[in-house]
Amino acid sequence: MARFQNAVSMMCVDFINLKSALDCFRDKGVSYLHIDIMDGHYVPNFTLGPDFCEKLSGYSPIPLDIHLMIENVDAFIPSFARVPGSLLSFHPDATYHPLRTIELIRNAGCRPGIAIDPSMSIETVKPLIADVDFVLVMTVSPGYAGQKIIPRTLDKIVELKSWLAGNGLVRPIEIDGNVSWVNLPQMIRLGGDIFVTGTSSVFQKGLGLEEALDRVNGIFAENEGDQA
């Protein structure tokens, strides 16, 4: 498994040319297909659904990374856990009993993760971290692509990395939000492992998809030994 992992944002993909994009992702070693699920309640936007996730999995061998930005999380886990082994993250503030939600995800055959909103501190989620497989740090407010980074969210990566090491835990840190050509190297050095690439990098206007993916892979290679 690659040291750093690229989770391309399927919210940003060109749906008219989806098949060729998926083939390109496979050929360029993309690690995950990141699928944002929005319900118009937890965030003011609507995006993708469980049937889309299944269709992707039916065609592409790349694992799914499903990010639930929804309310009533527990009721929808069966729908979004149809592809065994998928990463499945949720926002703990969107459910009354997050430990139960984690258990539901794991029992459904997926790998549970928690997503930390920019307004939420690392301290508030520490009791959950030992029970999940990964932690997603939001560096923008959830809901829309193309947002500017919230600079203070980068401090959470360092804080989380330090806390994990101090408690003998190994959990990949996923970073979601303005993973740009400028921000990606810094996010790597601060301690990120999985990076959700969207409109500020892989799907940047005027840049070919193959060229953009090669550029991400090049940044990964250049920073292989520089992580905090």
Image (cartoon, helix red, strand yellow):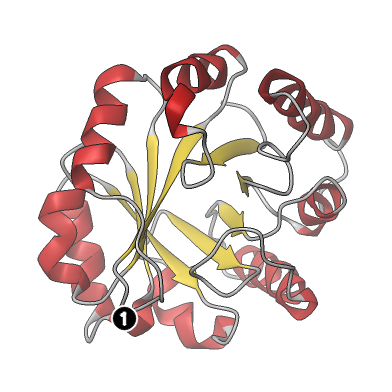
Q: Is residue 84 visible to us here?
A: no
Task: Please state which amino acid type lies under the numbered disc 1.
Answer: Ala
Q: Is residue 5 visible to us here?
A: yes
Q: Is residue 30 rendered to the left or right of residue 94? A: right
Q: Residue sitting at 21 percent across and 46 percent down?
A: 50
Q: Residue sitting at 66 percent across and 38 percent down?
A: 203
Q: Is residue 110 rendered to the left or right of residue 225? A: left
Q: Provide residue 220's location: percent of width, then percent of height.
A: 78, 33
Q: Quadrant of the N terminus?
A: top right
Q: Relative to 213, say whether 89 is above or below.
A: below
Q: Relative to 205, say whether 169 is above or below.
A: below
Q: Is residue 83 rendered to the left or right of residue 148? A: left
- Quarter-of-image position of residue 42: bottom left
Numbered disc 1: secondary structure: helix
Q: Which residue is mark 1?
A: 94
Outermost front residue: 16
Q: Residue sitting at 62 percent across and 17 percent down?
A: 28
- Quarter-of-image position of residue 19: top left
In this view of the protein, which residue sits in the foreground, 184 or 178?
A: 178
Q: Provide residue 54's location: percent of width, then percent of height.
A: 22, 34
Q: Is residue 113 rendered to the left or right of residue 219? A: left
In this view of the protein, which residue sits in the foreground, 86 or 228?
A: 86
Q: Residue sitting at 58 percent across and 66 percent down?
A: 137
Q: Provide residue 78's location: percent of width, then percent of height.
A: 11, 53
Few, some or many residues within 10 Å of mark 1 (<14, 14–19, 20+): some
Q: Quadrant of the C terminus?
A: bottom right
